[in-house]
Amino acid sequence: MIARADLLTVLLVEDNAGDVYMVREALEEAGCSYDLHVVDTGIKAMDFLYRRGQFSGSPRPDLVILDLNLPGKPGQEVMAEMEASPELKDVPVAVLTTSRSSSDICQRYPGLRSMFAAKTPLTHELIDIMKRFDRFARSRK
C-alpha cells in the first residue's frame, strides 16, 4: 500500500483522450505514485488551480502536466497566469506537447518552475518522461 505522503497530486491538462490514456498508462508503468486529475481546457485548468466553480473542492496539485495546444485558453496563457499569481507560481509545471519547437517555452516564464518534453508515441520514451516529471515534482516538495 502506498503511503499518502508519497502520492503526488497531478493535474493533467490535455484535450486529447488518447494522450490522456497514454499519460495515465505511462505513469503507472513508471511506478509513479499519483492522484491524477484531468481537465481538457486551459480555462478549466485555471478553475481547478484556483478552486473555482465545479472545482471548489479540488486539491492543490504537486505537478501540472500541461499541453500547450488547448481550446479556449492555450497553455502559454495558463503558464503566464500561473507565473503572475503568488498563489500558483510555485506549482511545478511540466509542459508536454507535440511541438518540439516549443522547447524554449519554459524560458519565457522565468518565475515559474517548469520543464519541457515533447510528446512521443513510443511507450518506453513516455515512461522515461513520466519518471523525469516525477523526479522534477519531488525535487522541491
Image: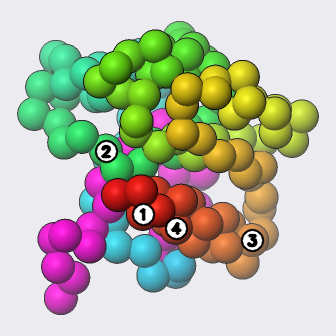
Mark 3 highlights which residue?
Answer: 125
- Pointer 3 or 4: first along the chain: 3
Looking at the picture, tell me which residue is in the foreground, 30 or 88.
88
Give yes or no for contact between labels 3 and 4 (Cβ–Cβ under 8 Å). no
Which dot marks residue 135? 4
Residue 132 shown left or right of residue 92 in the figure: right
Looking at the picture, tell me which residue is in the foreground, 62 or 53.
62
Q: Residue furthest bottom?
A: 1
Q: Residue furthest right?
A: 101
Which dot marks residue 41? none
What x and y, as percent, mark residue 65? 52, 45
Q: Residues within 10 Å of mark 3 (few under 14, many from 20)?
A: few
Give yes or no for contact between labels 1 and 4 (Cβ–Cβ under 8 Å). yes
Q: From what the image shows, is residue 106 above or below residue 54?
A: below
Q: CA distance from mark 2 to mark 4?
A: 15 Å
Which dot marks residue 138? 1
Q: CA distance from mark 1 to mark 4?
A: 5 Å
Q: CA distance from mark 3 to mark 4?
A: 16 Å
Residue at figure coordinates x 49%, y 21% from the top left: 83
Residue at figure coordinates x 59%, y 41% from the top left: 114
Mark 2 highlights which residue?
Answer: 61
Give yes or no for contact between labels 2 and 3 (Cβ–Cβ under 8 Å). no
Give yes or no for contact between labels 2 and 4 (Cβ–Cβ under 8 Å). no
Residue extent of the magenta highlight: 1-28
Give yes or no for contact between labels 1 and 3 (Cβ–Cβ under 8 Å). no
Q: Amino acid at mark 2?
A: Pro
